[in-house]
Amino acid sequence: MLLLDVSASVAYQPLGIDPRYAQVFNAFLFGLKASDRGAVGVISAKPRFTPVTGNQRDLAAAMRLIIQVPDGDRLGPSPVWDAIDAAITLTQEPNARPAVVVFSDGKSTGNMKGLDEVIARAQQLHVSVNAVVEGAGANFLARTTSPLDPADLIQRLTDATGGRRLLDRPPDPRQRNPGPLISVIMDALHQPPK
């Protein structure tokens, strides 16, 4: 399951012209093996998902539709934890190694579920959560005097579920290139568990 954060904090420009989403999706699609089934979800005001399928053409067609998120939905809350929780449910396939691959800046708002609940659910269902996190280390305050980096929260989730978190934070944001990092995760998912 690929989960794309399309909130305005990640995508400053219209989604149709932001090449990162095509890079991420193509790396995910090319990382699927013939026996794999996949789906794509978007994180916006209301998370949405494509059907789970083993057909790459169907998945690509569904991706073109689901990525068309109205700006009003992108400017609202970004319920990352709720979207990951919903994705965990959709990964339950017989005879599969369930995994969620997230592309986000980790800035999560407007959730019904908390991070600890999502970790517990992923552990219970044996789903690994993996992520490519971008954006500045943007220290912001959240009712504390210590800086909080959203990537650290994502790291808690990936560590607790046996996944991995990779950072796409070059000094110049125009040099972001998340596709190869998604490929690294996809390759790792097809390795025998340690």
Image (tube, rainbow, N blue to C red):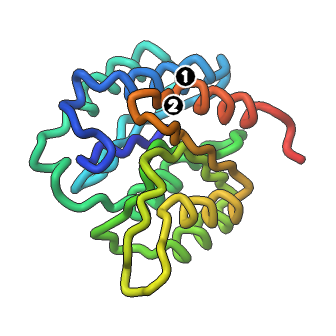
Is 109 left or right of 187, judged from the image as shown? Answer: left
In primary-sequence order, the first of circles 2 and 1 is 1
Q: Mark 2 vs mark 1: give the one in front.
A: 2
Considering only vertical position in the picture, is 130 above or below 178?
A: below
**Mark 2, residue position:** 178
Residue located 23% across and 39% down the image: 12
Residue at far bottom of view: 144
Is 192 left or right of 48, judged from the image as shown? Answer: right
As measured in the structure, the alpha-carbon distance from the residue carrying label 2 to the one carrying label 1 is 9 Å
Secondary structure beneath dot 1 equals: helix
Residue at far right of view: 194
Image coordinates for residue 88, horizontal then vertical, percent: 53, 55
Is 27 left or right of 175, judged from the image as shown? Answer: right
Q: Nearer the viewer, residue 30 or 146?
A: 146
Q: Which of 78 and 87 is in front in this view?
A: 78
Q: Determine the image quadrant of residue 116.
A: bottom right
Q: Label 1 sits on what residue type? A: Ala
Image coordinates for residue 123, horizontal then vertical, percent: 67, 66
Could you tell me if the residues under marks 2 and 1 are in contact, i.e. CB atoms within 8 Å? yes
Q: Label 2 sits on what residue type? A: Pro
Image coordinates for residue 23, horizontal then vertical, percent: 45, 22
Considering only vertical position in the picture, is 36 above or below 189?
A: above
Considering only vertical position in the picture, is 108 above or below 148?
A: above
**Mark 1, residue position:** 27
